[in-house]
Image (spheres, rainbow, N blue to C red):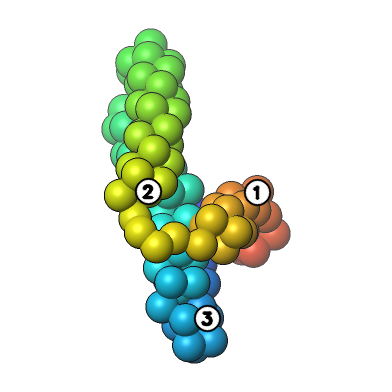
Amino acid sequence: MRVIGLQLLGSISLACVGWALGDLVIAYSLLTGGLVCALPNLVFAWMAFRFQGARAAKRVVNAFYKAEMLKFGLTVVLFAGVFALVRPLNPIFFFVAYVAVQALHWLSPWIIKVR
């Protein structure tokens, strides 16, 4: 869940940078791009890690498959929803935020220090 928190913090930080630049369209384009990446990961983490222990191994595997399918579907729906409903949108900044938040996920082992 620390990775999800890092992604949400990154999304909000990017939106604040866009807002500080004085452009509201850039700010909410950055925010929506970050959230389209972070929210499906949040749903995945919630679904996949509900079960614990050796006795629940089969349920854990099934939960991972279902969570991954839901994550993919939710990502597609969020992309479609943003491009259909959010006007005006700056797609460049939307995709920049999406890639940046995804990069936070990839770089999280170096960013988050676990003791």
Circle 1 residue: 106
9 shown above or below 53: below
Question: Between 8 and 3, which is closer to the camera in this rendering?
Answer: 8
At label 1, the amino acid type is: Trp
Q: Position of residue 93 (x, y in %)?
A: 56, 63
Question: Between 79 and 51, which is closer to the camera in this rendering?
Answer: 79
| Label located before the other in sequence (2 or 1) | 2
Q: Is residue 98 visible?
A: yes
- Image quarter of the C terminus: bottom right
Q: Position of residue 10 (x, y in %)?
A: 51, 67
Circle 3 residue: 17
Q: Which secondary structure lies at badge 3?
A: helix
Left/right placement of residue 60 relative to residue 14 reads left
Instruction: Name the residue rendered at 39%, 38% in the picture.
Output: 80
109 shown above or below 111: above
Q: Spatial distance from mark 3 to mark 2, Cα to Cα?
A: 20 Å
Circle 2 residue: 82
At label 2, the amino acid type is: Val
At label 3, the amino acid type is: Val
Task: Give residue 8's quadrant in the image.
Answer: bottom left
| Label located before the other in sequence (3 or 2) | 3
Instruction: Name the residue rendered at 58%, 53% in the picture.
Output: 95
Left/right placement of residue 82 relative to residue 22 reads left
Q: Which secondary structure lies at badge 2?
A: helix
Q: Spatial distance from mark 3 to mark 1, Cα to Cα?
A: 22 Å
Q: Position of residue 13 (x, y in %)?
A: 49, 75
